[in-house]
Image (cartoon, rainbow, N blue to C red):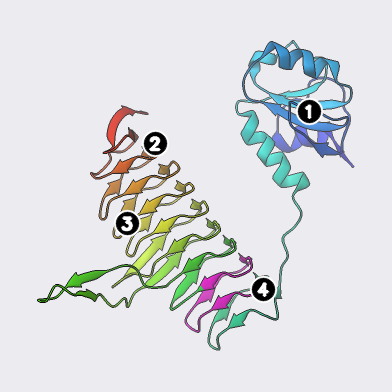
Amino acid sequence: MITAKDIANFLQLPLNGNDMYVERYAQLSSPMPHSIVFAKKYNDEFVNLLNDCESIMAIVTADYDGKLTCSHIISANPRLDFIRVLSHFFTQEKLKGFIHKTANIESGAKIGKDVFIGAGCYVSAQSIIGDGCVLHPNVVLDNRVVLGNNCEIKSGAVLGQEGFGFERDENGEPLHFPHFGDVIVGNNVFIGSNSTVERATLGSTIIDDNVKIDDLVQIGHNSHIGKGSMITVGAIVCGGAVLKPQSYLAPNVSIKEKVTIGHRGFAGLGAVVLKDVADDAVVAGVPAKEIKRNK
């Protein structure tokens, strides 16, 4: 049984109010007995709601200090600490060491320890999968794809197939550029459903450690996605583009080929980025223009 004190000790933050059992998590708008909730902004209605509830625990900002009668923790980032609590106390352990009978694993593929490969997956002979990876149903690793440890690839994602590279010949007919490169993925990478990561024409398409990629994202050949970057739904990263560490692409952003997004660069909703973006810059619009610097 989890207690409020257990959670406070885990977060290394003081517990205010009485200790209690915590059996579940809930939304702040609909709290339940013995649940944990969070509030990242102050609101008088939230104060009244929490004080009217019995046996509830809250993770809140310092604005709530002294105003709550329920069990609570004061946090600099309630949402982040709530995520940590859910991940530590409530998330079920992922399936390990299981390969579905319908998965097609070519001879020569190297599979690490405690790997889960779901129904209908395809893994090429040249691919390498690190320890603790999870491939949900119908994932494709084609040609040479190297996954680091503890990666999670959602259903329908395709890594390692050739990209859209053509050059017109003397008669104006498109001639395909053969792709001979690979895809290198670091540790703790998350790739969403129906996303694609193209193999490089020559060299490598690289996704560094701790990158998180949403559903329906296109990563073009020879791109390099820096450590800790996040790319949200519908974004397009054209061939040869570079995202420096901790970059962020909002939904439906398009990055032109060979453009560089600087460290901690941020591209806003639907931005079309045609030129390099400086470190810590926030860009938005079509075409994207810098609107501020975060530092």
User: Which residue is labeled 2 in the image?
Assistant: 268
Q: Position of residue 18 (x, y in %)?
A: 87, 22
Q: Residue at x 69, y 35 (%)?
A: 82
Whether residue 38 is situated above or below residue 237 in the rendered picture: above
Q: Amino acid at mark 4?
A: Ala
Q: Residue at x 47, y 47 (%)?
A: 230
Rendering quarter of residue 164: bottom left
Residue 132 in magenta?
yes
The local secondary structure at tag 1 comes to loop
First in residue order: circle 3 vs circle 1: 1
In screen coordinates, is 121 left or right of 286?
right
User: Mark 4–mark 1 contact, CB under 8 Å?
Assistant: no
How crowded is the residue under tag 3: few (<14 C-alpha within 10 Å), some, or many (20+)?
A: many
Whether residue 205 is situated above or below residue 227 in the rendered picture: below
First in residue order: circle 1 vs circle 2: 1
User: Which residue is labeled 1 in the image?
Assistant: 30
How crowded is the residue under tag 4: few (<14 C-alpha within 10 Å), some, or many (20+)?
A: some
Distance, label 3 to label 2, CA atoms, is 17 Å
Rendering quarter of residue 118: bottom right
User: Which residue is labeled 4 in the image?
Assistant: 119
User: What number is the disc on residue 149?
Assistant: none
User: Mark 3–mark 4 contact, CB under 8 Å?
Assistant: no
The local secondary structure at tag 4 comes to loop
Q: Which residue reaches farthest bottom? A: 107
User: Which residue is labeled 3 in the image?
Assistant: 238
| In front of the other: 123 or 85 | 123
How crowded is the residue under tag 2: few (<14 C-alpha within 10 Å), some, or many (20+)?
A: some
First in residue order: circle 3 vs circle 4: 4
Distance, label 3 to label 1, CA atoms, is 43 Å
Q: Amino acid at mark 3?
A: Cys
